[in-house]
Image (cartoon, rainbow, N blue to C red):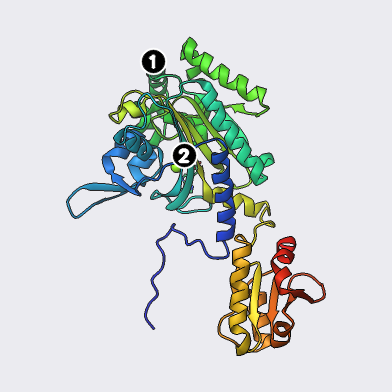
Amino acid sequence: MAKQIQAIRGMNDILPTQSPLWQKLETVLRETVASYGYSEIRTPIVESTDLFKRSIGEVTDIVEKEMYTFEDRNGDYLTLRPEGTASTVRAGNEHGLLYNQEQRLWYMGPMFRHERPQKGRYRQFHQFGVEIYGIPSADMDAEVLMMSARLWQKLGITDHVTLELNTLGDPQERSVYRDALIAFLEQHQDVLDEDAKRRMYTNPLRVLDTKNAEIQAVLVDAPALDDYLGEETKAHFAHLCELLDAVGIQYKINPRLVRGLDYYNRTVFEWVTDSLGAQGTVLAGGRYDGLVGQLGGKDTPAVGFAMGLERIVLMLETLSLTDDVKGPVDVYVTAMGDACKVEAIKIAQSLRDALPTLKVMSHCGGGNFKKQMKRADKSGAQVALVIGENELANNQVALKYLREDKEQQLVARDALATHLAELI
Ligand code: ATP
Ligand code: MG
């Protein structure tokens, strides 16, 4: 037998049994952003490699080791997008959407990072994100956090996620702090590991979120960014905290939260869960007022977040919050004998006309009662309609309950749609 070709490691199929849960999640996301008046943007999966190098930063995990980069047939360097913000800014600049305008955008789609695959970490994964341009005020930071809190509420996972917040200051504040931090790290070179040593001069703030316990112990005495922040930055953060307090969103201020992408300033945040083990961050983001300018546009304030859909799906499964997820079929229509086939098809069509959201599957291929009922059961439908010669002669349809212990019913054809609308 020919050898079967397998999917690429870390790139998953979403199978028919799993897609209803994905669809439910996607529907909640779409409905929520719509309720805030946001517009969708769709950008290409592939962009110039330079776009990500210039935005995410050369000395970051993503650019140093995670990008899927290749040379195309023209000799151009292209990259499968590892995240959505850079592309959104590129598109916004290119189409003149950003300067002197307000934009509240969202996107959803696959992202690619060459990481070690494990639970909650894949090489092709999906993100849903929002990006807001043109609004410098902390009201906007608060809005995206309130929106994320609303998402948790709709998904039923509010009790399983917590919000961590920090402010990274503005670039000039951070640069003074950076020098102080480098001076501190230089004095503790003996405990630094390879990663920390490499980053000490290029990206010292990243050393702060090291997982190495020895380094963490030394960092307790490191200079704190908070002491280097100016009045405006502090006021921005205080205003955000005030708004969150006012609407009852709880948060923990985590001075070690620095995020793995270079473009953030001021507010950064992560929603984390302890239901997933090591891969606990389900949504992350912050303000990035410098990025639009850095990518060639006119300076435009910006804030946004990205959510990892696989991690949310895993949470919903782990917490058994999948009961209300409906399968692909509500009603399965059978025809007993060739003479009834055409009428059965007509009945199925009329139901689709009358009830556009009802999911109606027609039996195809004939077979006896037993075989057709087996298929009906396997489809996951709530009810089967049995259309036989006797029923047709009386302008009726037999309705069989597949999931409940209820007697079969005869329903008049012209009352069928109303009957099913009440039932399902
Ligand atoms: P992590 O610290 O887990 O590597 P990150 O800081 O690299 O996350 P971001 O770039 O901020 O993540 O992406 C936002 C969200 O996208 C993450 O919080 C996570 O939910 C999800 N995500 C990131 N990388 C992956 C991946 N390889 N597989 C699945 N989900 C991911
Ligand atoms: Mg990562």
Where in the figure is residue 43, as x and y percent of width and height?
Answer: 36, 45
Q: Amino acid at mark 1?
A: Val
Relative to 355, is 265 above or below?
Answer: above
Q: Which of 390 and 21 lies nearest the eye of the viewer?
A: 390
Mark 1: secondary structure: helix
Q: Earlier in the sequence, mark 2 or mark 1?
A: 2
Q: Which of 178 and 391 lies nearest the eye of the viewer?
A: 391
Residue at (62% x, 19% y) in the render: 242
Ligand 2: quadrant of the figure: top left
Q: Residue tagged by mark 2?
A: 39
Label 2–label 1 contact, CB within 8 A: no
Q: Residue tagged by mark 1?
A: 176
Whether the residue carrying mark 1 lies under 8 Å from ligand 1 is answered with no
Whether the residue carrying mark 2 lies under 8 Å from ligand 1 is answered with no
The N terminus: image quadrant: bottom left
Where in the figure is residue 205, as x and y percent of width and height?
Answer: 42, 27
